[in-house]
Amino acid sequence: MEVFSVMTYAVFGKDGESGDLAPLKGNRTDKGPVLIVCPSSVIHNWENEFSKWSAFIVAVYHGPNRDLIIDKLEAHNVEILITSFDTYRIHGSILSVVQWEIVIIDETHRLKNEKSKLYGACLKIRTLKRYGLTGTIMQNKIMELFNLFDWVVPGCLGTREHFREFYDEPLKHGQRSSAPERFIRVADERKQHLVSVLQRYLLRRTKEETIGHLMMGKEDNVVFCAMSELQKRVYQRTLQLPDFQCLINKDLPCSCGSPLKQVECCKRTVPNGFIWPYLHVDNPEGCDSCPFCLVLPCLVKLQQISNHLELIKPNPKDDPDKQRKDAEFASAISRGDKILLFSYSVRMLDILEKFIIRKGYCFSRLDGSTPTSLRQSFVDNFNSSPSKQVFLISTRAGGLGLNLVSANRVVIFDPNWNPAQDLQAQDRSFRFGQKRHVIVFRLLGAGSLEELVYTRQVYKQQLSNIAVSGKMEKRYFEGVQDCKEFKGELFGISNLFSDLSDKLFTSEIIELHEKQGKEYKHNHGQKLDLPRLEMDLVPEKGIAKKFLVDNERETTGEPALADLGIVYAHRNEDIVNFGAGNQEKATLSTGLKGAVTQPYYPTLGTKRSDVEQEKENVKLVASSKRRKRSQYSLLAQSMGMEEVEFSKWLLSATRAEREIVLRDYKKRKEKIR
C-alpha cells in the first residue's frame, strides 16, 4: 500500500479518492513511467494488486510479447512496467534508454553482488528516484550494504574502499572473540556511526513492531542429531579420499623435497582421485583453478552424507529401543499439526517423499519443476485441506512469496550457507494471518559439515544485527570473514574438511564463551545478573507465551530429549540477538522437554560428583520455575483473571499497560507488608 501511495500522490498527482482513480491523461507527458523489477514468481502478484487498488495502465515486460510492450511504452500508453530480474538482466539495454520517473526493485538483496551482470545492468537505469524493497537487507557480508545503498543513492556511503576500511574491517575485527579492548571500542563507535548514516535512507519495520501483538510467537530450535555409525564411517573414509586429502594438505611442504607447497608443486592435480578425473575428462592436465575446483564438489559430497535419509531412517533390523526413539522423535515434531518440510536438495525431497508415502501421510510438494501457474493452487489446496499434513518444499523454489499460515511446524532438513534462506523459509508460516504458535526445527548432523554451516549462519546473523540494527552481539568466534590472518574455527579449507565426528563443535564454542564471560565478570569484580521481579513477571510478552505453550505441552506428554537420542539442542534466539533489549533469555518452550534454557549433554561416563552437581542444578532451575509461576499466578489474581485469560491479555497489551499493572501490583504488595 505504501508503494501505491507514493506513486498515486507523489508521481501522478492522485490522492486516492474515487474520482481520481481514472488515469490523468494530461499528466502523462509530464511524468515518465514507473519501472518495477521483481522475481518472476511475484510478477502476477504485483499485477493483481495494481488491478485491485489502482487504475494505472500496467504492462508486463516478460515472455514472448516484449516487442509489443515496447511499442506501447514508446507511445506513452504504459504508466507502470513490471519485469523480472532475468528479463532485465538479458534485455536491460532496451529499457535503460527510457527516462523512468521511479524505479522500484523488489527483493533488492538480489543486487548484493557488485560483480553480477544484474547489478551492472541496474546501475545503467536512468532515473532520479530509486527504491528498494527487501526483508533481508544484509545476508552474508557487510559489504553487501554498500552495494545496495550505493545503487539507491550513489555515493551516500563514500567510496567502496572507504566503506571497507572505515566500517567493514573494524566491525569484523571487533567481533573477534580475542579482540583487544581498543578494537572493541573502535568497532562500537563505527557501528553507531554506520547505523546513523543508514537510517537516513532506510525505513525498516519488523514483525515485532507492527504485528507482533497479533501473533502467538515463534521459537527457532536447532537440533543436533547424532549420525549413525554407518554415516560416521562413511564421513571419515570420505575425508581420506585423495581428492579431499589434496585440499586438506594443500599448504604442507611438497613430498618431492621442493620448498614449494603441495598445491604449488606435485599435488596440484589428483589423477588418482574419485572426483577430479570426472571434472577433467576433456582436460587431463588440469584446469587453471586446480585443485580448488574440487572444493564445491567435495562439499556437496559431505553434505549428502550428513543428511541422506536412507542412512538414518528407522531400520526394521534396528533394536526395538532405537525404533521406539525414532517413532517418538517423529511424534515430537508433529502431534496432528501441519508441517512444512524444507530442503534445498531436490534429490533429498525425493527420498523424503518416499519416506512420507511409506508412513501414509497425505502431502503436497513444490520444487523448481512445479509450473508457476500451478504453484498458487498447490498453496491454496494445502491451506484449505484438513487432510494435507506435510508440504515438501524446495528452499530455493518455495522460500519466497508463499503464504502457508495453515502450518504451525517448520522443519528445515538441511542448513543453507546463506542464513537468510532458512529465515525466509520459516516466514512462509510465521507471517500475518498465523493464529498459532510456530515451532521451527532445524535438523543438523552433529559432528558433520552441517555444524560448520550453522555456525557460519550465526556469524553472519550477528554481523547483520551489528551493522544494520546496532545491536550488541556475543563474541563467539575467533575467525574473521575474508581475512587470511584470522581464519579461526570458521573459515578456510582446512576447517571445511576437518573431522568433527568426535566433537560437539557448536556446543563447545558456546560453552567456552560462557566460561570466559563468567571469568571476566569474576576478575573485574562485577556481580552476576540476578533475576529481578520485573523480568520474572513481565519481561515483554515472553512469559505469557511460555505459559500457554507449557500448559499445552503438559497435557500432551511430549518425550524428553534423552528419550529421543538427541545429542544437543538450543534455541537460535538464545545464541543470536543478544544486545539492545535482548539481554534477557527467551522464555518460550522449545517444544521438546529438556531443552529449556540449557543445552543437553549425555551423562554417560560422567563422574559421580558431576552427576550430583547436575542434579543440584536441576533442582535450582525447578525452584526458580516454581517461584516465577507462583508470582505469575498472584499477578493474574490481582487482575481478577485466570492464568490463561491473563496470558492472553498480556500478549495483546502494550508495554505501557504492562508497566502500569506491574507498578500497581508492587504497590499492593508493599501495603500488605
Image (cartoon, rainbow, N blue to C red):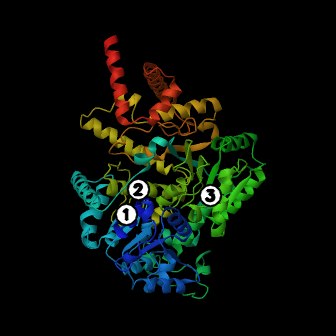
Contact check, label 1 and label 3, Cβ < 8 Å: no
The spot of residue 227 in percent (x, y) is: 62, 52
Query: What percent of the width, then of the height, locates residue 38?
Result: 48, 70
Left or right of 143 on screen, residue 135: right
Answer yes or no: is residue 673 visible.
no
Q: Quadrant of the C terminus?
A: top left
What residue is disc 2 on?
Answer: 459
In this view of the protein, which residue sits in the foreground, 559 or 95? Answer: 95
Q: Which type of secondary structure does the marked residue at label 2 adopt?
A: helix
Disc 1 residue type? Gln
Position of 546 with respect to 565 (left or right) is left
Q: Is residue 120 visible?
A: yes
Q: Nearer the viewer, residue 443 or 248?
A: 443
Give the camera-side residue of 414 and 308. Answer: 414
- For marks 2 and 1 on the same chain, the one whose residue lies earlier in the sequence: 2
Distance from disc 2 to disc 1, alpha carbons, whole Å, reads 9 Å
Residue density around tag 1, few if under 14, some if 14–19, many if 20 or more, within 10 Å? many
Q: CA distance from mark 1 to mark 3?
A: 26 Å
Numbered tag placed on residue 307 in the rendering: 3
What amino acid type is highlighted by mark number 3?
Asn
Per the image, the residue denoted by label 1 is: 481
Figure check: 445 above or below 511 = below
Residue plotted at (60% across, 55% down)? 413
Question: Circle 1 — which element?
Answer: loop
Answer whether labels 2 and 1 touch (C-beta < 8 Å): yes
Q: Amino acid at mark 2?
A: Tyr
